[in-house]
Image: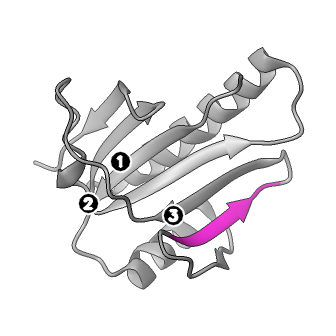
Amino acid sequence: MPQNLNIFVRTNHSKEDFAREIEMLLEVHLTVLNEEYIFYSYTDPKNRWFQIGIHDLINDSDGLNFEFYDYQIEIGAFGIRDWEKHRDNVNEYARLIFDKLKSTGSYDLLLVQDVSFKLDEFHVT
């Protein structure tokens, strides 16, 4: 089954300011959702999507300190039946978003798969 990736972000920005930063970095226009945990979403022409929201995850025994992070960006794709193509598309999109955020030097970041496997992280120095 295809799986989504998540980027956890630590920032002192409000959700509105963080969303504006994402829009500028990725050159996209976010859809406002204002649900309980999900505030914004975007779907690109390749059927890849991401959602920005908050989370209620607690730190786990493997050292994934979710409580340290303010926002969660979940990245996925739809309409791609081939599992490998789906995985590659999601990985590529998550890496693009992670690297754009990292390039600002403004955010502590944690990239994970299945909210259990750390793929990358970055901390502001």
Residue type highlighted by circle 1: Lys
What's the distance in space between the residues labelled 2 and 1, CA to CA? 7 Å
Q: Is residue 32 above or below residue 106?
A: below
Residue type highlighted by circle 2: Ser
Residue 41 highlighted magenta (yes or no):
yes
Image point 37% across, 28% down: which residue? 116
Residue 21 highlighted magenta (yes or no):
no
Q: Residue furthest top?
A: 84
Instruction: Report the span colored magenta.
Output: 38-44
Q: Quadrant of the N terminus?
A: top right
User: As drawn, is 13 to the left or to the right of 15?
Assistant: left
Residue type highlighted by circle 3: Ile
Image point 36% across, 49% down: which residue? 8
Q: Which structural element holds mark 2? A: loop
The residue where tag 1 is placed is: 102
The residue where tag 2 is placed is: 106
How many residues crowd mark 3 within 10 Å: few (<14), some (14–19), many (20+)? many
User: As drawn, is 113 to the left or to the right of 110?
Assistant: right
Q: Nearer the viewer, mark 3 or mark 1?
A: 3
Image point 49% across, 75% down: which residue? 36
What's the distance in space between the residues labelled 3 and 2, CA to CA? 17 Å
The disc, 3 or 2, on the residue closer to the chain's N-terminal end is: 3
Q: Nearer the viewer, mark 3 or mark 2?
A: 3
**Badge number at residue 52:** 3
Percent position of residue 11, x then y:
25, 66
Percent position of residue 66, x then y:
25, 46
